Image (spheres, helix red, strand yellow):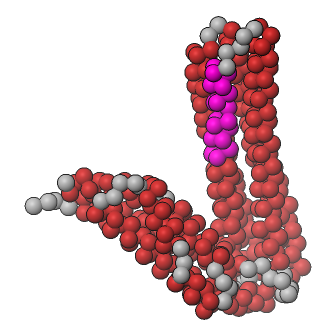
Amino acid sequence: TFLKAMIFSLAFVAEMHPDQVSKLVWDYFNKLSTNAKDAMEQLQKSELNQQLNNLFMEKCGEVSTQTDDLKKKLVSFAMELLCLLVQDSEKLKLQIQEELEELRLQLQPNAEQVSQKMNENVQALKQCLKPCTNELQNSLNENAEQLRQQLAPLSQQLEMALAPFACEFKDKVNQHVDKMRCQLTPYADQLQNKIDQHIAELQKTLIPFAKGAQEQLNRQIECLAFQMKKNVDQLRTKISDNTEDLKQKLTPFAEEMKGKLPKSSEELHQSLTKLNVQVDQQIEEFCKNMGTFEESFNKALVQHLEELKQKLGPPRECVVEGHLSLLEKELRDKVNSFFCTLKQTQEDILSFPKP
């Protein structure tokens, strides 16, 4: 029926995340030749069309006339975006270079003060991040210890009943790892708020030095905000992926033991010891991976500020390619807008009275 088809179409749009489409297009764009003519030739032979189709089929296996039409619209839109990226890249690069030159000239009389303010801002960012990342690390350690405490007593129940133990072990893992994810994720939001405040303060600090070039400064600040937001999004993804990975690594242990019934008390003791060691190893690996990512996360944020300082300073032979971040931001904005329009269109059709 029409109603069922439209509801299914809405579900299809909801299942497809704009960031997935943006990433697919952006990753493919980065693989293309830097020469616009060569890139367009590569594009004509590209496999992006098939990659997008595969993504849509993965998200929505059942195909109807309505969803097939939506899929064609999305593929067509993505291919158009890729063409625009190729055409606009060099143009935007030249534009950003001209804007940066204007901004540098405006800042030049106060170059030392600007450099000092940027250095102060870098130090302030480090101080701003420290409490948040410390809290995240403390929460990570506390949750890891709680998980150990939840699972350790269960191993003693092996002597009584292996089958119920396996089920309870799996339930405890799922329950506590999900709880861990819920407790860690808000730290990403907290960091994003701190970063937004920090960027606003940086912009406020630099505006007095950029009279006559405020638009160019705003563009650079916008680029900085986008880069840092990407880092926070990566942190959210890392928390989600690592906790899910921990869950997948822990749950099979009990099932493995259930399938290998110990023949003696000594063998049982060895199995218990092995289980506890395996659990500890996986939890330690999880904590280590998260700790390493936190460190690289902080370094990346500071690096973005250092790159902005470099761009605002005297021209150098090697200039950071800031136009690429702006291109990627524009790509994501266009994809988000397209999805919002598509969803609204489907909802409008669904709500329109049928004769």
Q: How many marks?
A: 0
- The image quadrant that residue 179 belongs to is top right
Residue 206 in picture, x, y percent from top left:
75, 75
Taking the image as shown, residue 90 lies to the left or right of residue 319, namely: left
Relative to 27, residue 34 above or below: below
Asked whether 156 or 10 is in front, the reply is 156
Rendered residue at 88%/72% (across/down): 116
Relative to 21, residue 141 above or below: above
Q: Residue furthest front?
A: 263
Rendered residue at 72%/88% (across/down): 97
User: What is the quadrant of the C terminus in the image?
Assistant: bottom left
Taking the image as shown, residue 47 lies to the left or right of residue 269, namely: left
Taking the image as shown, residue 352 lies to the left or right of residue 190, namely: left
- The image quadrant that residue 118 belongs to is bottom right
Taking the image as shown, residue 72 lies to the left or right of residue 211, namely: left
- Using the rendered image of the protein, determine whether residue 317 is visible from the camera's viewpoint: yes
Rendered residue at 44%/75% (across/down): 77
Residue 6 drawn in magenta: no
Residue 48 in picture, x, y percent from top left:
53, 72
- Using the rendered image of the protein, determine whether residue 14 is visible from the camera's viewpoint: no
Residue 251 drawn in magenta: yes
Rendered residue at 66%/62% (across/down): 230
Residue 140 in picture, x, y percent from top left:
74, 37
Asked whether 68 or 306 is in front, the reply is 68
Q: Main secondary structure of the magenta part?
A: helix
Residue 58 in picture, x, y percent from top left:
47, 56
The residue stretch that appears in magenta:
240-259
User: What is the quadrant of the N terminus in the image?
Assistant: bottom left
- The image quadrant that residue 323 belongs to is bottom right
